[in-house]
Image (cartoon, grey):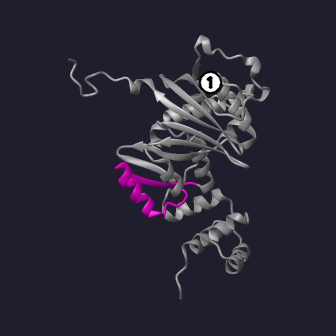
């Protein structure tokens, strides 16, 4: 007699707890036999069991505490412990650091390879917790990169744009912006907040460049971090012109000119730092590509001693 798979053991627990009917399990077995796939995913995809009930049952079986990520606010200093790509690839979210331990919400806490890799990376003991895959991905979208910008549009709240509100654009008198030139859509508050949020997040991530590149049906946002272009949650294609216009206005560029390259600059204050931004606008087949070079004045200005040179 073969031993039951992990999925079958979880299904038995769901039935015992009255969360799944035996005939639903039989139907899921039939689907798995004819179409393939993981049993537990079939149960949630067919809505025989909610994702939350599934997570709680798996947590009980594994003796792993469940966590509701929607009720947590992950501190930036904790989130920054785990590289963006590692978090997304392994579907995990660091949620707290305490007494030499890092508590991590995982869609699959049985992924021992991910736990071992993370332990080597952060040099802390890892305490796995379990959360729904959707909650993990939503949390990563909201914290990493520029945040979930479509969510910012749907529900702009002070909490969601706290970093963006701290961005202060500093314009010299000779670069004063004529707001009459600005198209109505680029004056829209969500567009302003989105651009500010993109800039603020780039500074937080210590990015050297921001790339906003248009494609046929999408707009791709990427940050250059440690020499590598890292994809971030991107704004919808529908906002391409509004975002481009906003950045052109800040840079003192001609928003009506879309056929030739343009270069500009402006300055922001964010996280207590003055940041110079160099802007390059390049026409492409699907619209204008934007490259923003980030120059942190504090990091560029060092004393002679800091540069290892003698004063005389």
Q: What element carries label 1?
A: helix
Q: Mark 1 points at which residue?
A: 251
**Residue 114 position (above or below residue 27):** above
Where does residue 252 sit, x and y in percent of width and height? 64, 21
Front-most of residues 34 and 7 = 34
> Is 136 situated left or right of 115 in this image?
right
Quarter containing the C terminus: top left
From this viewpoint, is residue 16 visible?
no
Residue at the location (47% across, 63% down)?
A: 111
Q: Residue at coordinates 52% horizontally, 56% vertically from top-left?
A: 89
Q: Which residue is drawn at 55% across and 23% down?
A: 268
Res. 175 visible in picture: yes
Residue 52: percent from the left, percent from the top?
64, 56
What segment carries the magenta color? Answer: 106-131
Residue at the limit of the structure toward the front, as seen here: 260
The answer to whether residue 224 is magenta is no
Q: Is residue 185 above or below residue 101?
A: above
Q: In the displayed structure, does residue 113 sit left or right of residue 88? A: left
Task: Give x and y (percent) for residue 35.
Answer: 70, 77
Between 56 and 33, the residue placed more toward the observer is 33
Which quadrant of the structure image shows residue 37? Answer: bottom right
């Amino acid at each position: 007699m073969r031993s039951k798979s992990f999925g079958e053991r979880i299904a038995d627990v769901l039935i015992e707890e009255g969360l799944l009917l035996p005939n639903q399990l039989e139907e899921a077995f039939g689907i798995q036999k004819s179409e393939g796939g993981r049993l537990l995913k079939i149960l949630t995809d067919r809505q025989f069991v909610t994702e939350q009930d599934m997570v709680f049952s798996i947590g009980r079986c594994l003796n792993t505490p469940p966590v509701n990520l929607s009720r947590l606010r992950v501190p930036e200093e904790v989130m920054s412990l785990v590289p963006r790509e590692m978090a997304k690839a392994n579907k995990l979210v660091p949620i707290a650091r305490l007494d030499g331990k890092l508590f991590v919400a995982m869609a699959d806490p049985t992924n021992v390879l991910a736990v071992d890799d993370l332990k080597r990376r952060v040099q802390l003991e890892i305490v796995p917790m379990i959360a729904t895959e959707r909650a993990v991905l939503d949390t990563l979208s909201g914290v990493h990169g520029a945040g979930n910008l479509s969510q910012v549009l749907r529900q702009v709240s002070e909490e969601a744009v706290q970093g963006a509100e701290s961005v202060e654009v500093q314009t010299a008198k000779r670069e004063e912006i004529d707001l009459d030139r600005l198209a109505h859509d680029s004056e829209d508050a969500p567009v302003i907040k989105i651009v500010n949020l993109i800039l603020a997040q780039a500074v937080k991530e210590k990015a050297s460049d921001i790339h906003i590149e248009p494609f046929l049906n999408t707009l791709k946002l990427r940050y250059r971090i440690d020499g590598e272009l890292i994809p971030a949650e991107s704004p919808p294609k529908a906002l391409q012109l509004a975002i481009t216009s906003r950045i052109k206005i800040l840079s003192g560029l001609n928003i009506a000119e879309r056929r030739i390259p343009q270069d500009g600059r402006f300055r922001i204050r964010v996280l207590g730092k003055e940041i110079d931004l160099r802007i390059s606008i390049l026409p492409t087949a699907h619209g204008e590509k934007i490259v923003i070079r980030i120059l942190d004045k504090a990091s560029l200005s060092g004393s002679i001693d800091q540069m290892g040179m003698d004063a005389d």
